[in-house]
Image (cartoon, rainbow, N blue to C red):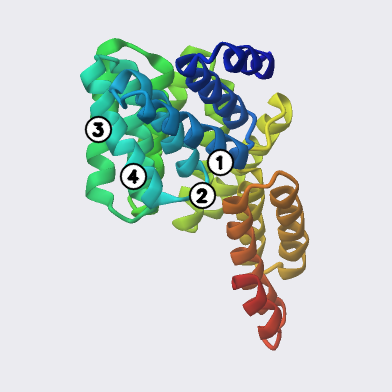
């Protein structure tokens, strides 16, 4: 339908409509996990919006989308640049829900980049706004992102508390996809702290929910975390099998960030299984 709409807009020479259609094609690809296509359409929409004058009403949506996609591809610097710009745009536009939501994305991006004070500040801003407007899905998302950053920073108790609150919000909102993400990322937080039993319980819940709702988003990474658990348990053969599964999932879904995580864990596993296997481990890391 969007492709047909684009053809009609082109025949009319309606640049504003074309800009909006490109954005929605990008947004649809983003929702389906097709990040490469999503970025292309979002960049095209932004170029069109800037050619039309570049005010907030036309540029905010593609900038928001670019922030989200770069964040979910693990591209922290690009995500920070777009998300920080978009927080200000949404504030000027008076869109408090989206200002809160993109603040959560910014928190995740800062955490990914290792800028933890800024990550916590952005997350707190998003949580506060989401509570004020009483928007549960956005509140769950911002708490989730704060939990991820706290876990990366090694603050397990605070991380778990944030994830628990996020789960409660997601339950009330009926947001099963958010619960899938929370279990996966909380599993990683437990894994960083080497609380293996808790990590495995959450990652198993995550993968079961993913099967239930039919999502493969970041699944390669979540599967790879299970491989690292097997490695910590002293089971390198099982770890290798699990890391192979993780790599296949990441490759099949064209999610490079997940694939990079799976490759790193595979390299650790190769060395643990055979300390002389340096060449294959180095190949995985490179």
Q: Position of residue 154 (x, y in %)?
A: 35, 55
3 is higher (above) or lower (below) than 40: above
Identify the residue shown where x is 40% and y is 50%. Answer: 76
The answer to whether marks 4 and 1 mark residues whose Cβ atoms lie closer than 8 Å is no
The residue that mark 2 highlights is 188
In terms of sequence position, does the residue under pointer 4 or pointer 1 come before the other?
4
In terms of sequence position, does the residue under pointer 3 or pointer 1 come before the other?
3
Q: Taking 224 as reference, is 76 left or right?
A: left
The answer to whether marks 2 and 1 mark residues whose Cβ atoms lie closer than 8 Å is yes
Q: Position of residue 5 (x, y in %)?
A: 63, 13
The residue that mark 4 highlights is 80
In terms of sequence position, does the residue under pointer 2 or pointer 4 come before the other?
4
Q: Nearer the viewer, residue 83 or 24?
A: 24
The residue that mark 3 highlights is 124
The answer to whether marks 2 and 4 mark residues whose Cβ atoms lie closer than 8 Å is no
Identify the residue shown where x is 67% and y is 19%. Answer: 3
Distance Cα–Cα, label 2 vs label 4: 22 Å
**Tag on residue 262?**
none
In terms of sequence position, does the residue under pointer 4 or pointer 3 come before the other?
4
Identify the residue shown where x is 54% and y is 28%. Answer: 179
The answer to whether any part of residue 149 appears in the image is no
- The quadrant the C terminus occupies is bottom right
- The quadrant the N terminus occupies is top right
In terms of sequence position, does the residue under pointer 2 or pointer 3 come before the other?
3
């Amino acid at each position: 339908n969007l492709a047909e709409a684009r053809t009609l807009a082109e025949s009319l020479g309606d640049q504003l409509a074309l800009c909006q259609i490109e954005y929605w094609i990008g947004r649809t690809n983003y929702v389906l996990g097709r990040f490469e296509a999503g970025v292309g359409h979002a960049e095209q929409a932004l170029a069109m919006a800037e050619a039309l004058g570049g005010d907030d009403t036309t540029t905010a949506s593609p900038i928001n989308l670019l922030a989200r996609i770069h964040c979910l591809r693990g591209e922290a610097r690009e995500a920070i640049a777009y998300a920080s710009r978009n927080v200000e745009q949404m504030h000027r536009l008076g869109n408090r829900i989206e200002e809160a939501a993109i603040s959560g994305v910014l928190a995740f991006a800062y955490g990914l980049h290792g800028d933890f004070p800024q990550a916590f500040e952005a997350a707190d801003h998003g949580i506060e706004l989401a509570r004020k407007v009483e928007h549960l899905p956005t509140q769950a998302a911002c708490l989730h992102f704060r939990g991820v950053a706290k876990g990366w920073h090694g603050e397990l108790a605070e991380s778990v508390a944030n994830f628990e609150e996020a789960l409660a919000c997601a339950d009330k909102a009926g947001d099963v996809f958010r619960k899938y993400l929370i279990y996966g990322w909380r599993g990683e937080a437990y894994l960083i702290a080497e609380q293996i039993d808790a990590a495995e319980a959450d990652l198993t819940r995550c993968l079961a929910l993913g099967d239930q709702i039919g999502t493969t988003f970041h699944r390669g990474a979540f599967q790879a975390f299970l491989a690292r658990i097997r490695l910590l348990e002293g089971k390198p053969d099982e770890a290798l099998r699990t890391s192979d599964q993780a790599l296949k999932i990441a490759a099949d879904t064209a999610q490079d960030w997940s694939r990079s995580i799976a490759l790193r864990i595979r390299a650790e596993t190769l060395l643990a299984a055979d300390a002389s296997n340096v060449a294959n481990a180095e190949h995985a890391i490179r």
